Image: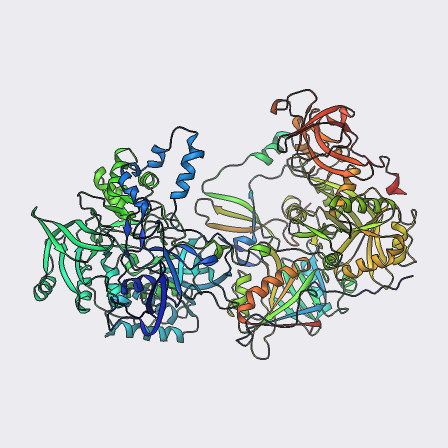
Amino acid sequence: MRIVCPFCGERELGEFTCLGDAKPLRPAAGASEDEVFDYVYLRDNIAGEASEHWYHGGGCRAWLKITRNTLTHEISSVEPAAGVGARQVAK
Amino acid sequence: MITSQPHRLTSGGLIDRSLLLNFRFDGKTFAGFQGDTLASALIANGVKLVGRSFKYHRPRGILTAGSEEPNALVELRTGARREPNTKATTAELYDGLEAASQNRWPSLRHDLMAVNQLFSPMFVAGFYYKTFMWPAKFWEAVYEPAIRRAAGLGRAAGVADPDHYDKTWAHCDVLIAGSGPAGLAAALAAGRSGARVILCEDDFALGGRLLADGGTIDGVPAAEWISRTLAELASLPDVRIMTRTTLFGVYDGGTYGAIERVNDHLPSPPEHQVRQRLWRIVAKRSIVAAGAIERPIVFAGNDTPGVMMASAMRSYIARYAATPAKRIALFTNNDDGWRTVEAALDAGLQIAAVVDARPDVSAAHRALAAKTGFAILNGFVSGVDGGKDGVRKISISLAGGARAEVEADGLAVSGGWNPAVGLTSSHRGRPKWQDDISAFVPDGAPPDMVAAGAANGAFGLGACLRQGFAAGAAAAQSAGHSGSAGTPPVADDEAFSLTPLWHVAGKGKAFVDYQHDVTAADIELAQREGFESVEHLKRYTTLGMATDQGKTSNVAGLAIMAAISGKSIPETGTTIYRPPYVPVAIGAFAGHHRDENFHATRLTPSHHWAVEQGAVFVDTGLWKRAQWYPRAGEKDWLETVIREVKAVRSGVGFCDVSTLGKIDVHGPDAGTFLDRVYINTFSNLAVGKARYGLMLREDGMVYDDGTTSRLAEDHYFLTTTTAKAGPVMQHLEFCRQVLFPQFDVQLTSVSDQWAQFSIAGPKTRDLLREIVDPAEDLSNEGFPFMGAREVSLRGGIRARLFRISFSGEMAFEISVPARYGDALVRNLMLAGKQFGVTPYGTEALGVMRIEKGHVAGPELNGTTTAADLGLGKMMSTKKDFVGRVMAGREALVAPDRQVVVGIKPTDRARRLRSGAHVVPKGEIPGPANDQGYVTSVCFSPMLDQWIGLALVERGRERIGEIVHAHDPLRGEDYDVELCNPVFYDPDGGRQRG
Amino acid sequence: MAEFSWLSRSPLEHVLVVGAHGARDVAPGISLTEVRNFDLIQVMARRGKGAELANAAKVRFGMAAPDLPKAVSASDVTLIWSGPDQFLVLSKSGKHTIDILSQAFSQSASLSDQSHARALISVSGAKARAMLAKLSSLDLHPAAFPIYAAAATSIDHTSVNLWRGDDRPDGQAVFNLLVFASFAESLWHTMLDSAAEYGVDIGYSGELG
């Protein structure tokens, strides 16, 4: 598999680590145990297009959000994480 | 020297008669020529019997002339280089080659295991499942050992392979598999267009079927066209032609696997060279021009030595000038088979008869038969009279019902051609059935791949050239190269008419899968027993599951299944194709990564100094760490470790802790950021101070721990455990970029920037004063416990000092830029001589941390909470942090959790072992009353007995209770007392002093 | 009181043997040269300070810092892209130290000293690409990896920074590698094994050339 890192260009799979489902968002401080439980444990087992967190640890150390078809391994989009590099994100 | 090759033609062929090569087969010496394969050389020497079959030990000869060979498998080479199941049909002959036949005892000609044939009713499909079922206890004692003795074909060398293997990458626009007419035409078109081209050819010679079949291209003989084409390709800047290289796999994203047999054609690789090289090729486009495989017809006796694929027979005659037979019969259902007749006649051989399943043989072929004087028999071969010495007579069922017999010493068989769909189907693509050639053709290939020529079902020479050229031009264009492809090569198309024929019913064993001894009867049995689906058929009969992956057998097998189950072949379908297309040595996949190079090794800056000291090293992840430093006269490691611990606790010692993960955390929000990743607070840490921190996973379990210091308002220096350095960096980047992107914080690994040593013991300050600049205040007031700051060393080097202790002693950690690590350790030895400074290893480090009840890897094992480790109070309630909510779950705060507690054996002399289970005293050990387990143990020099840490239910409430330690692994049972985990200096006075 | 010497020791000092290695029957296809002493500073822009850092870099180095995978060189310094909004400053020892640069970039970036964290190896020669192909999955074809191209990538699962410098006087491409110090010996062995069949000429230089 090859992934086109938005910063480095096309690289082979071995440079990346997959963390898994990127859909669940970490609940804000003060969220209930149930909400956090869902965030930590509830995952869809998607046969088709899935959104995933990948880390380009063997390259530029950017966290990426990748849309990948779990059936074909086809990657349709690669987006940098919100806080990649020096990107400013409102507090 | 043996020079006679009785079955060699005196002229012709692509062999170099000036280069005579001697070789041995089953101990007998023969000669062949440069350009031979082992198979062609054996044929030239009249050797027909080359192996014994897998189950029935039937005599077998050479069936094919390529990598699809199911029969002629030999052990090649001897000693450590011995390689079983090597195909004689692809093994290049070299001078001194040694090969041996397989699966026979005591000899190939007199194989006692052939007795299996008498029991053949027992060895039908599924016989393992049916035969070895009962009595159950017989499996281990009787069946398995017996099966293991009888099973398998060749013998592995049994010792390490002495050769080197290599792995490498290549990149191109257009990758082409195969150098037949389609492949060469594709390379021409793509190369002329300006594309970067790689062409892989399995064979050592380029040209594919042209090498045996010839023909006329662009008005010149094929051989001349090949050399012209190769010259033009060589003149193009970015065309790479790789011979002896098989494209064996197609992987995601345009990545391909190829194996190059760099030096398999030599007795052993020249010095500094590799035996084989594994290529990972990244290609924008690929063209599969891998040709087609001629398929057998299944009839009784079709495995008799001397029965050979028609195309293989003419390869041996035309390419190798070796004659498999003198009087040849042909059994065919198509025009292509007739080319073997022409080749045989050209070589002056006799044609016994042609058995053609088609009633309407072409006029040209009829004329040839009439002119030459052989009969064309419309019908089927129904039996072969012969044995280990080859074919003698062939029985024929004529179309009208009559029978005939023909005397011949060789039978060429052609059942038509199957395009090689292995590569185009390896992404689960299913090939589709094409009626006019009665074969599966590629379908469902990945979008960047096309098939061309025979691999695409186009069997005419002209069509192969046209398809290959068009595919090459299109591939180059879609890869962004718009140069002109020029004029395509031109040739005529031969006629190809075929009437499908798979199986001739009759008496006697008719083989479908030669290598796994699967017969037509086995397929019929499988169908009767309900194993009708092709995937079931494959597994029940093992059809196509041998190392040849059923290249000659799969289609015939499923055609027979289709016929008996009353379905069409496309309805019956094919099984899944998977890489590798040909067997690939494991050594090639490993490449450089074997033995000491199995993985990369990390060394600390003081490593070579430690080697000089005679340190014993332990692998910790990728690191080599000094485990202890034995001295002359010490009888074992324990004596060494006891000395090291006592030296530290009574004087001073140092330990290399450079392996800890070290991360610079910079930025205005660094403190707030750390508050989110640690359970305790770091934003309020004063500059110049260090603090122990604990981080959780989001599920509430402890992830890692370490000391983090604040070196400046916007700069923290974070340490991790050795094991988690990489994962923690990844986790922190996740927190920074994904979870908490609002914080202005930057992270850099500085693990390798600093050489770091822990200096411990009551004389630590004395030692430090020797090497630290006298202006630095190291007093308890000037540098209090948990202080952290930069200092100057004598000689001007800057260092960082951290007053932290893992050993429980007065201790500092000192770090210097890594290139000074070696100097620092030597200076510590020099300065510490007067104090008896003692280097200590990870074992003494571990002993001292257990004596102090500090948790480490065995306790931070992914199942423990902060409270389990006795660190629950560190958990802040005033802020959000990773793992906070889940750590509060009912089960994670339950009062009966297993928590860290100390243990001591009730018998002071007893040795403890980690892993032992803890059960209440007096209870019978078992899962029902298991209350925990021992995590860490050591012999404590200070207590003069074994001590340990354990995770025990309600452990902290049970201090003083005697429990039972049950160690079924080592067969030990003993009582231990639960105690305070801090065994030594429980009030901590020593480290603060 | 003992007199201490503070000898700087490069991570390859123990293992590097100057001279020929591997095949001798051919002219060496590979030159491997270690550079032993240099300053190497990781510069990472603070949030929202990318433009500010670019300006500060222009002031400090007289050239723009690379914002794409490239290396840029002036007479006394090379700036090597190492990731989004970050680059490495490679210079002769003492020229652009962490102390000096910290002042130049105090408003816009976080700096980390990597001078001792890496070994610097340059690879050149007719077989340099063939040898590097065994280590790296990158396409180093001249069209795909021209002079001054840079990459943050991995060799043997270990992070490295790789960039192409100016060609040698004989026209051969030069590939520079920064590898982590603790891995350096192990990678060196791997490099020698990969290069042995081409013949290797091994050397080192004390300072950045």
Q: Is residue B188 above or below residue B898?
A: below
Residue B891 at x, y percent in the picture: 65, 27
Q: Is residue B508 above or below residue B831?
A: above
Residue B448 at x, y percent in the picture: 39, 57
Q: Is residue A70 above or below residue B901?
A: below
Residue B577 at x, y percent in the picture: 36, 48
Q: Residue furthest bottom?
A: C169
Left or right of residue A73, residue B629 in this image: right
B126 or C187, nearer to the observer: B126
C207 or B560, nearer to the observer: B560
Q: Is residue B658 above or below residue B989?
A: below
For the C terminus of chain B, the quadrant is top right
For the N terminus of chain B, the quadrant is bottom left
Left or right of residue B573, residue B731 in this image: right
Residue B909 at x, y percent in the picture: 76, 32
- What residue appears at the point 10 percent right and 55 percent down from the top-left corner? B377
Residue B663 appearing in the image: yes
Residue B27 is drawn in which quadrant?
bottom left
Residue B238 is drawn in which quadrant?
bottom left
Left or right of residue B341, residue B128 in this image: right
Residue B70 appearing in the image: no
B803 or B443, nearer to the observer: B803
- What residue appears at the point 89 percent right and 59 percent down from the top-left corner? B773
